[in-house]
Image (spheres, grey):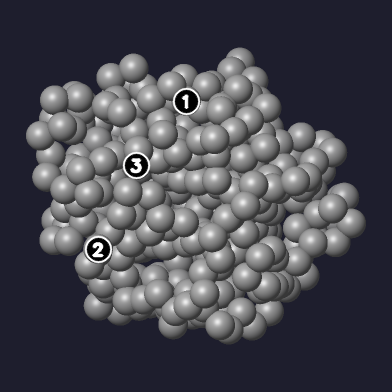
Amino acid sequence: MNYPSVIAEDAVNSFDNWGTASQPRRHKGQFRNPVAMHKMGLKKTLGLMLRFMFDKPRNTVPRLPIPVHAITRQQLLAAPDRSLFRLGHSTMLLKLNGHFWLTDPVFSQRASPFQWMGPQRFHAPPISIADLPPIKGVILSHDHYDHLDQAAVRQLAPKVEHFITPLGVGERLIAWGVAPAKVQQLGWWQTTVVDGVKLVATPAQHFSGRGLHDRNRTLWASFVIEDRDVRLFFSGDSGYFDGFKEIGRHYGPFDLTMVETGAYDPQWPDVHMQPAESLQAHRDLRGRVMLPIHNGTFDLALHAWHDPFDQITALAAIHGVTLATPAIGQCLDMVQPATGVAWWEAVKLQELDAQPATV
């Protein structure tokens, strides 16, 4: 693939094991993580697939509606700068320097190549794409279906000025009809500046692909987002690795880290973090407040739907980490976020009350 040019980040002089400033490591057309991935094997893979299809615990999906704060365009326009609205899963709406930004926008009913099967949303988006104001930029971490929604991209494209993607992901957008001039593709440790907002694509430990024959043909990344004196981190998807410490050394401390906390399991340790690892990643990044993401919207693992919230809350209390857990659609101040909002507890109690009595 021929990738559009990007601006190299000259301030970063040490790249350790993660490649060069221009492009991370590739081998036979595939991007690679700095550390070899755990291989599950055919037998375990088939066993896991069968369990997902026929033997999943019932509590991976909430049995009652979770709270959603509906958002209007007027509310967004009136919101102060540095407001954040969690729209679900890893989709965040950020207001920076007077403009709106979206991370990994997924609005479809299912995180799947098909809308008749696959992981279904627990809740509707708190605002429709049609009701969103103009979007300055969309930040995409990788091309998995729960992060890159083709229908959403096509509907968003007319109102979005910039799409910032890892290498190769932008090619998908262009193939879907997004104007090439709107797309910027970054390798790890590369940066761009859009209307005063600085974006740096930083390493992550994950993988990519949307079909049977395109594994790792596109890159995956996390992102540093800087708006003047406010510094944010968006993890995308990642297993735990030393890259978080490197990012923290170069770009920390962060006012707010949006760190993946969900869809984990000991059977896939390299690509999603356990809650204790998510907390450690936040600490490695030198974050002030942690916002756990990648949870509360889709059933992508074998743990209870509320387990990510339960575990990260308990761990944060033990380690003295400040946690922000806004409900879906709730406005959060990036600089002084409200903390201690345990909205899922009420749903859990209602679920327990709704259980049939046993003899």
User: Would you say the residues marked 2 and 3 are in contact, meaning their CB atoms lie under 8 Å apart?
Assistant: no
Q: Is residue 144 above or below residue 319?
A: above
Residue at 36 percent of width and 76 percent of height: 252
Label 2 or label 3, whichever comes before in sequence order: 3
Percent of width and height locating residue 57: 55, 40
Q: Is residue 240 left or right of residue 252?
A: right
**Which quadrant of the figure has residue 279?**
bottom left
Between residues 258 and 81, which one lies in front from this camera angle? 81
Name the residue nearer the viewer: 52 or 142: 142
Which mark is nearer the camera, 2 or 3? 2
100 and 283: which one is in front? 100
- Alpha-carbon distance for marks 2 and 1? 27 Å
Residues tagged 2 and 1 counted as in contact (Cβ below 8 A) = no
Left or right for 97, reference 1: left
Give the Cα distance between marks 3 and 1.
13 Å
Vertical position of residue 151 compared to residue 184: above or below: above
Query: Label 2 sits on what residue type?
Result: Arg
Residue assigned mark 3: 101
Q: SS at mark 1? A: helix
Query: Dot 3 lies on which element?
Result: strand
Q: Mark 1 is on which residue type?
A: Ala
Amino acid type at mark 3: Trp
The number of numbered discs placed on residues in the rendered structure image is 3
Q: What number is the disc on residue 228? A: 2
Write the residue at 17% across / 61% down.
Answer: 335
Give the image location of residue 158, x and y in percent. 43, 21
Q: Which mark is residue 157?
A: 1
Crowd tier of the residue under label 2, counting other residues whose Cα lies within 10 Å: few below 14, some 14–19, many 20 or above = few
